[in-house]
Image: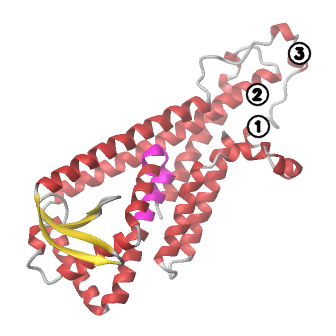
Amino acid sequence: MMDYFVTCTIISVCCLLASLGMKSAPSRLNFYVIMLALIAWFVPWQYFSQLPLFESTSQYTVNVAEFSFLNTLIAPTSAQVITSESSIIAPVSWLPSLNHIFSVLLFSGIGLFTLRVAMYVKLVKNLKANSSLYSTSKRENCIYPIRFTSIGGPAFATGLVNPVVWLTPEMENRKELNSVIEHELTHLQQGDIYWTWLICFIESVFWWNPICSKLARLAKEQLELSCDEKCMRKLKGKYQLDLASLLLSEHEKKSKYIVSTKMGKMSQEVQIVLGVVAAAVVLGLASLGLTMDSRLKLGFKSAADIVPIVSTELVPLMLGACIVALLVMKR
């Protein structure tokens, strides 16, 4: 299992570095690079070494699960090596394995995604009940209804099967209306609604993983930037002026609700901290399980003899996981 976490982390860091180096590249290309890192977390890398295709490459690989910082520093005494088989105690049964912890986190993430889907269905029902049809737009043999509603933000799109563009009534008399509608229709034409649901699924399943949370946020940003780039090519300077006007008006509204904004930021920071702690605990328990199992095999008689040694390995690993996660989120 440690092979899986190490491989996915390396892929994610490489994709983040590649995205940093491609700032001048099209946003859509950056989006695909980040999505590659997110999808990599669904690949069971730990089982690839068992495939016949990779049998000849075993001499060039390293088994991360057997790696330990103190295996080369602490050697068992002769008495421990000569210990009879009857005196060797089986691995500690009360310690949950990394597979069990990962399964619990995975199923809790699926439950979180199910809750989000239920909330989304309820939101769409409320939108339809409190809306009126404004117009329709035909794009590439698809007809998209545009409706006014008092629920939600200034403009957004919903619907996997029957997509709809939703606007607030205050947008009807604004000069930026055409640019806003073009932005949302571009999202639907590019299939961004499907990508958004995929990101939501990954973000929910790996809610405890700060790296996935950071990648999901970056992927959403790149989706918006790619849509803006396409709208700018079509509407030229008008879209830029309308976008700047909307951003200024939104900034004025937000400045009136400083307290609520700070509370939202605090809740975001709390979620990040919880994700970092969860990742550190997973890595720590994995190290604890591997270390205790290896020490018992080396000849230690009980778990009590292992605790002082485990603490010297467990604490640095957990601190390292926190530092790496925080550094990644700084991007």
Please name the colour scheme applied to the rendered image. secondary structure
Residue 152 against residue 93 in the figure, above or below: below
Gap between marks 3 and 2 measured at Cα: 17 Å
Magenta-drawn stretch contains 205: yes
Which of the 4 quarters of the picture holds residue 198?
bottom left
Which amino acid, mark 2?
Answer: Ser
Gap between marks 3 and 1 measured at Cα: 24 Å
Is 150 left, or right, of 280 in this rendering?
left
Query: Which mark is in front, 3 or 2?
Result: 2
**Is disc 3 in contact with disc 2, using a CB cutoff of under 8 Å?**
no
Is 243 left, or right, of 141 in this rendering?
left
What is the quadrant of the N terminus in the image? top right
In the image, which disc is placed on residue 79? 3
Residue bearing mark 2: 294
Mark closest to the chain's N terminus, 3 or 1 = 1
Which amino acid, mark 1?
Answer: Glu
**Is disc 1 in contact with disc 2, using a CB cutoff of under 8 Å?**
yes
Magenta-drawn stretch contains 221: no
Secondary structure, mark 3, is: helix
Mark closest to the chain's N terminus, 3 or 2 = 3
Which amino acid, mark 3?
Answer: Ala
Disc 2 packing (10 Å; few <14; some 14–19; many ≥20): some
Which residue appears at 49% of the width and 69% of the height? 31
Nearer the observer, 73 or 212: 212
Nearer the observer, 73 or 114: 114
Residue bearing mark 1: 66
Q: Position of residue 152 (x, y in %)?
A: 18, 59
Disc 1 packing (10 Å; few <14; some 14–19; many ≥20): few
Q: In the image, which residues are magenta?
A: 203-220
